Image (spheres, grey):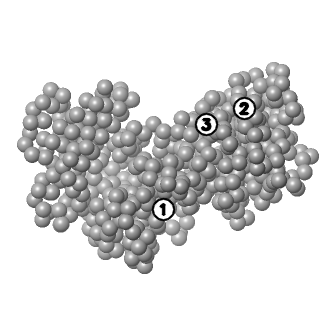
C-alpha cells in the first residue's frame, strides 16, 4: 500500500433501504479519526431508495466509495467489498450500526501499532441509544444469543473469536483476500460464521478492547430475527458436516448437550425461546 | 473484420479439451480467428487439431517458452487481440464474441475471464464474482486463458521466460501495464470452467515456486494484497 492510501477500510453492505444507512453515516462523520486515515466502502447491491442522493449528502463529509453490483447475495457483496477496500485493515459494520466517536480511532491505532497479518481487534456490541429507549425491541435484541455473547463484558486482551464473532471485528485485509481464495465456492450461506471459522483456523489472534465498542440498532422484528437464526442453524449444520472435527456449540452459544435440552429451550419465555427455537429448527434442517 | 490470434498448448499424452476449445473459438461471428497450437507430448496429433497444430514438441518445455515459439515469425501488425489458452478449460457457448466485446468496452489491455465457482483456483480473486459483469483489477493470472489487446503487445511480448512456467509474471505485468497507462481486468460475465485437472499437476511446484521468488526479487512487482484489488467494478445488468 502506498502512503496515500488509508490504513482502515470500513466495509458496509448496503442493506435494504438507503435511508436506513443515514444514522451510520452520520455517526461516521463524528469520528475522532481523521478522514484521511480511513475510507468507507459501501457496497450497493441493490439498495432501495435514493442511495445516490444519500451519498451526495455525505460526499464532502466522508471518504465514501460507493461500489455498485447487481444483487447477488451477501457472499458476493462481501467479497466485492473486501477486494474494493484499499486499507491495510478492514472493519465490517452492519447498515443498522452506529459508530461511537472513538470506534475507528481504536481500530486504526490497533492496526497501526500491530500491523501483523494475524492481528485483529474486537469490542463489545451494545444497543444504540435509540434501541435502549424501546423496551420490546431491546428485549428482542438481547434475546439473540450471538448479540448477547457479543455484548458480554470481558477483560481487555486476547479473546477467543468463538465467543464474540457476532460483534464487529477488524482484521488485516491481506489475510482475508488471500484466505477467501480458493474456498469461495464452498461458502454455505453461513458466510459470517464460515469466515470467522476460517480466520480462526488460520490463526487470527483477536484482542478485545472496550475502546472498540460498537452500537447495533438492528431490530428486524421477531419473525425476521427467527428466520435469521434458522438460516444460521442450517449453515452451522452444513459446516459441521463438512468439517467433522469442528465443534459447533461454542460458536452458536449452545451449552454441551444442547440437543438434549432443545425441547426445554423451545419452551422458554418470550423472544429468547423463539430465537433459540429458530436456531434449533435450522440445525435440524441442516442435518437432514 | 477484426483479427484475433489464438495461441494454445495441449498435452497430447493426457486428457484435454483442446478440440472443444478450438471449435468454440472458430465459431466466432464477430472476429476473424487464427489459431496456432503446439502439441506437447509424443502421442499422435488428433485429426481435429491437425489444421491448427503448427508444431509438436516431445520434451517438457516451459509454457512461455512455447508461447514465444508460437509467436516467432508471426506478424502481429494486423492482430487486434492475442488470446492465450491452456487445454483444460470448458468455454461457454458464444464465448469469444461476448468476452472480447466486454474487453473492448472496458478497455482492458490485459484481461481474462473469471473462473466458474467449481473451478480449481490458486487465487480466489479470479473466481467469478456474482453481481458483476467485469472489474478493473490489478491482477490477471497467467492462465488458463488470458488476452492481450494490441496496445499491450509491445509491453508484454515476447513473454519473459525467466520464471519457470510463468509463475510471478502475473505480479509484474500490472506494474508494467500501469506504467504504460494501460488497464487490466477480469470479465465475470463469461466465466470459464477450469476443472479438468488441478493447475500445476504435471510439474514440480516447489522448484517452480522457488524460481518465482528469485524472479520477483529482481523485478518490480505487486504483493498479493495489492494485486487482489478491484479498482473499479462494473455491475451486471439487472
Q: Residue at x 81, y 24 (%)?
A: B46
Q: Where does residue A8 sit, x and y in percent of width and height? A: 42, 63
User: Around disc 3, counting alpha carbons within 10 Å, would you say few (fewer than 14), some (14 to 19), or many (20 or more)?
Assistant: many
User: Around disc 2, counting alpha carbons within 10 Å, would you say few (fewer than 14), some (14 to 19), or many (20 or more)?
Assistant: some
The residue most toward the left is A269
Question: Which residue is label 1 attached to?
Answer: A67
CB of mark 3 within 8 Å of CB of mark 2? Answer: no
CB of mark 2 within 8 Å of CB of mark 1? Answer: no
SS of the residue under disc 2: helix
In the picture, residue A113 is in which quadrant? bottom left
Residue B31: assigned label: none
Question: Can the viewer see residue A62?
Answer: no
Q: Quick one: quadrant of the N terminus of chain A?
A: bottom right
Question: Which residue is label 3 attached to?
Answer: B193
Q: Is residue A222 left or right of residue B51?
A: left
Measured along the vertical axis of the image, is residue B119 above or below residue A179? above
Q: CA distance from mark 3 to mark 1?
A: 27 Å
The residue most toward the top is B43
Q: Are marks 2 and 1 on the same chain?
A: no
SS of the residue under disc 1: strand
In the picture, residue B72 is in which quadrant? top right
Q: Residue at x 31, y 55 (%)?
A: A168
Q: Residue at x 15, y 48 (%)?
A: A143
Q: Residue at x 28, y 61 (%)?
A: A97
Q: Where does residue B71 sit, x and y in percent of width and height? A: 86, 45
Q: CA distance from mark 2 to mark 1?
A: 37 Å
Residue B20: assigned label: 2
Q: Where does residue A235 sit, x and y in percent of width and height? A: 33, 37
Q: Where does residue B28 sit, x and y in percent of width and height? A: 75, 44
Nearer the observer, A251 or B231: B231
Counting residues from the start of the chain, the first of labels 3 and 2 encountered is: 2
Q: Chain of mark 1?
A: A
Amino acid at each position: 500500500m502506498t502512503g496515500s492510501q488509508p490504513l482502515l477500510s470500513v466495509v458496509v453492505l448496503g442493506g435494504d433501504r438507503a435511508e436506513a444507512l443515514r444514522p451510520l453515516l452520520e455517526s461516521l462523520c463524528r469520528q475522532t479519526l481523521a478522514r484521511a486515515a480511513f475510507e468507507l466502502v459501501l457496497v450497493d447491491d441493490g439498495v432501495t431508495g435514493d442511495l445516490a442522493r444519500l451519498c451526495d449528502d455525505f460526499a464532502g463529509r466522508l471518504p465514501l466509495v460507493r461500489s455498485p453490483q447487481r444483487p447477488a447475495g451477501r457472499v458476493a457483496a462481501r467479497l466485492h467489498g473486501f477486494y474494493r477496500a484499499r486499507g491495510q485493515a478492514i472493519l465490517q459494520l452492519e447498515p443498522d450500526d452506529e459508530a461511537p466517536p472513538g470506534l475507528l480511532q481504536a481500530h486504526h491505532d490497533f492496526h497501526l501499532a500491530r500491523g501483523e497479518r494475524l492481528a485483529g481487534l474486537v469490542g463489545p456490541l451494545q444497543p444504540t441509544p435509540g434501541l435502549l429507549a424501546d423496551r420490546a425491541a431491546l428485549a428482542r435484541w438481547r434475546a439473540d444469543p450471538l448479540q448477547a455473547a457479543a455484548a458480554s463484558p470481558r477483560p481487555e486482551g486476547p479473546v477467543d473469536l468463538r465467543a464474540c464473532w457476532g460483534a464487529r471485528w477488524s482484521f488485516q485485509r491481506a489475510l482475508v483476500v488471500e484466505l477467501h481464495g480458493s474456498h469461495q465456492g464452498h461458502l454455505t450461506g453461513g458466510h459470517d460464521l464460515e469466515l470467522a471459522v476460517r480466520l480462526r483456523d488460520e490463526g487470527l489472534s483477536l484482542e478485545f478492547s472496550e475502546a472498540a465498542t460498537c452500537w447495533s440498532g438492528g431490530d428486524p422484528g421477531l419473525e425476521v430475527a427467527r428466520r435469521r437464526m434458522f438460516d444460521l442453524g442450517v449453515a452451522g449444520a452444513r459446516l459441521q458436516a463438512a468439517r467433522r472435527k469442528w465443534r459447533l456449540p461454542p460458536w452458536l452459544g449452545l451449552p454441551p448437550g444442547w440437543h438434549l435440552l432443545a425441547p426445554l429451550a423451545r419452551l422458554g419465555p418470550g423472544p429468547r425461546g423463539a430465537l433459540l427455537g429458530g436456531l434449533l429448527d435450522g440445525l435440524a434442517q441442516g442435518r437432514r | 473484420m477484426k483479427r484475433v490470434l489464438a495461441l494454445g498448448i495441449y498435452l497430447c499424452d493426457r486428457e484435454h479439451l483442446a478440440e472443444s476449445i478450438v471449435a468454440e473459438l472458430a465459431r466466432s461471428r464477430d472476429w476473424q480467428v487464427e489459431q496456432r497450437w503446439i502439441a506437447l507430448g509424443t502421442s499422435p496429433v488428433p485429426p481435429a487439431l491437425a489444421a491448427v497444430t503448427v508444431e509438436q514438441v516431445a520434451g517438457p518445455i516451459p509454457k512461455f517458452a512455447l508461447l514465444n515459439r508460437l509467436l516467432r515469425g508471426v506478424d502481429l501488425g494486423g492482430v487486434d487481440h492475442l488470446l492465450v489458452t491452456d487445454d483444460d478449460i470448458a468455454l461457454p457457448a458464444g464465448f469469444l464474441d461476448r468476452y472480447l466485446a466486454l474487453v473492448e468496452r472496458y478497455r482492458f489491455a490485459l484481461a481474462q475471464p473469471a473462473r466458474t465457482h467449481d473451478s480449481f483456483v490458486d487465487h480466489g480473486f479470479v473466481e467469478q464474482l456474482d453481481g458483476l459483469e467485469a472489474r478493473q483489477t490489478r491482477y490477471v493470472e497467467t492462465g488458463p486463458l488470458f488476452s492481450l489487446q494490441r496496445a499491450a503487445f509491445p509491453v508484454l511480448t515476447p513473454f519473459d521466460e525467466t520464471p519457470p512456467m510463468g509463475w510471478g509474471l502475473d505480479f509484474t505485468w500490472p506494474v508494467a501495464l500501469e506504467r504504460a497507462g494501460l488497464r487490466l481486468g477480469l470479465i465475470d460475465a463469461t466465466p470459464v470452467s477450469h476443472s479438468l485437472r488441478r493447475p500445476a499437476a504435471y510439474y514440480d511446484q516447489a522448484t517452480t515456486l522457488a524460481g518465482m521468488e528469485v524472479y520477483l526479487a529482481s523485478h518490480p512487482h505487486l504483493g498479493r494484497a495489492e494485486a487482489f484489488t478491484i479498482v473499479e467494478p462494473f455491475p451486471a445488468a439487472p
